[in-house]
Image (cartoon, rainbow, N blue to C red):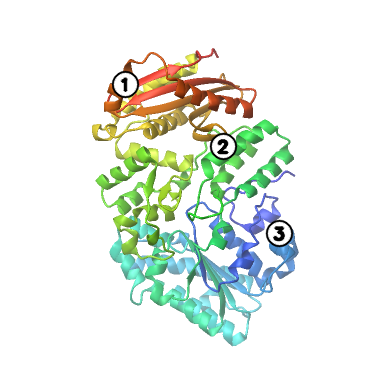
Amino acid sequence: MSKKIPYAVANYEKMVNENYYFVDKTRFIRELEKYQIPVFLRPRRFGKSLWCSILECYYDINRADRFEQLFGQTDIGRNPSPLRNSMLVVRFDFSEVVPGNDARELQAHFDQVCANSFRVFLARNSVRFDGLTLRDLPADGASALAQLQAEISSRQLPPLYIIIDEYDNFTNQLLTARQDDLYRELTTGDSFLRTFYKVIKAGVGKGSVAQVFVTGVLPVTMDDLTSGFNIAQIITLEKHMLNMMGFTQAEVDVYVNEIFSEHDWPAELRRTVGDDLRAHYNGYRLLPDADETLYNSTICNFYLNKLVINDGTLPTETIDHNLRMDLNWLRRLAGSDAEIRRLLEMLLFEGTLSVDMTMLASAFNMGRFFDPHFLPLSLYYLGMLTFQDEYMLGFPNLTVKTLFTEYFNEMEHIDVSRGYTEMFRQFLSDHNLATLFDGYWQVYIGQIPAQAFDKANENFFRTTFYELCLRYLSHHLMFAIEVNHPNGRSDWEAIGRAHTTFENQALLLEFKHFPRAEGERLGVLGWTAPRAEEIAQVTGYADDLQHRYPRLTVRRHVVYTVACAGFRFFSLEPPWKG
């Protein structure tokens, strides 16, 4: 039976039992054991829940007889640590907590989620607890956990390993919804949440709790809880831990090669898939001096799952919209719609935000998170930006760049659903990129507010034209921008999909932008042919593309844009007939 892709599968036992592919990260278990209470944070869709499941299986004393089955083929299985299968494991998933409207309602939801975890724990360990059931425990989560710890001590049972997944999910929802008073109530005084973590701290001190692993997205809640849980060790920025979640290039290569070997798909498709994955999901540099960039693992599986299900047909949809951050987060972080617009324009026009490295910290409270000066790093923690170098943050990949283009359209009320049908239908008939670009300029750029249009540049035109084509033509062509080649980085590419009229065809478009004064001085809008330097650039990229994919016929184009004025578009080869 062929292996399955573990997209949306966060249960390690299921992956082993039902023959899923597995990228082995278990070597990091030994690294984690250097800490007693590690807190490790990553953006959404980086595989945090699966890692929690792996830890649960590894440390649970009840799974000792299945260790070889579960871990025999893994790194940690070949060289296990002394702590393997030595503890009673209780796991909490706080993404299930519904925030509610007040502290009482929120506590009721929190206690119910805790009760569900205790029910599973007691069922798994019923022999050790002599029939103790959930009914024998207090109703509130903190008191129930305290009683369990007391039972462990009095019965001289193995200690607890506590796993907390999505620890900040519900508190982050409070922040997004601007329920600041409720958030402060939870993280100060004798709130039920602070009491819960104090119980864990007390258990560590008494020995009934041996290890704790906490994961989530932001350090804000952990920092605001610090006085009640000051034993936590936030290891998010520890260099030796950076690759614990997310895929490295080497891991992706092995993973994809295994898929292609099993399915016996052609080498050229393998190159295309590798390029697609790299452009859309790689690029997360979590420290300026990180040894390599990382792939977003869950979204990588999103793509590969579609590829396998459709027997090697390249996915037309590359964006898992579960990755999309609610626009309310941007509103909250930026402080006002005017500041959101300034942020979006900066990113879409310049592509980067400057960052003060002295502000990078593994812990910070709510006040700092919403400090406008901290905004670039807030976006970094949310996975929207990543380090380009020690001075700049930028988009990690095309997926995030596309999401920010959508934010821009939403903020500026730019309609991307109406008025485009005829121009794209015509392109499918005549394959004329010049006519399509003219339609984009008239319909899309025509909606851009004047204050934004005055500042628009090459990066903006390239990105928005890419996003619009992706939206309407992804069933016919694969699109990419800023693609690295031996001869440099091409601006805009489209490669025809198999079994379409574009098969074995490729389009290259080189952008060149001029400020208005320079454009008028050079008379750009009156040019009748492209300049030699742009022809040389796009020709070099065409040679590179054809060398990589010999079957392709590549058509080259150059477009010159002039701020506030217009454009000139040149096709170096005529459109082909479908």
Q: Secondary structure at mark 2?
A: helix
Asked whether 340 or 203 is in front, the reply is 340
Residue drawn where x is 50% and y is 43% of the image: 320
Q: Secondary structure at mark 3?
A: loop
Q: Are marks 3 and 2 in contact (CB under 8 Å)?
A: no
Residue drawn where x is 41% and y is 31% of the image: 462
Q: Residue 272 lies in what quarter of the image?
A: top right
Residue drawn where x is 60% and y is 79% of the image: 159
- Real-space Cα distance between discs 3 and 1? 63 Å
Quick one: quadrant of the N terminus? top right
| Residue linked to disc 3 | 74
Q: Nearer the viewer, mark 2 or mark 1?
A: 1
Q: Residues within 10 Å of mark 1 (few under 14, many from 20)?
A: few
| Residue linked to disc 2 | 276
For the residue marked with disc 1, what is the amino acid? Leu
Residue 148's x, y, as percent?
54, 79
- Real-space Cα distance between discs 3 and 2? 28 Å
**Height in image: 479 above or below 399?**
above
For the residue marked with disc 3, what is the amino acid? Thr
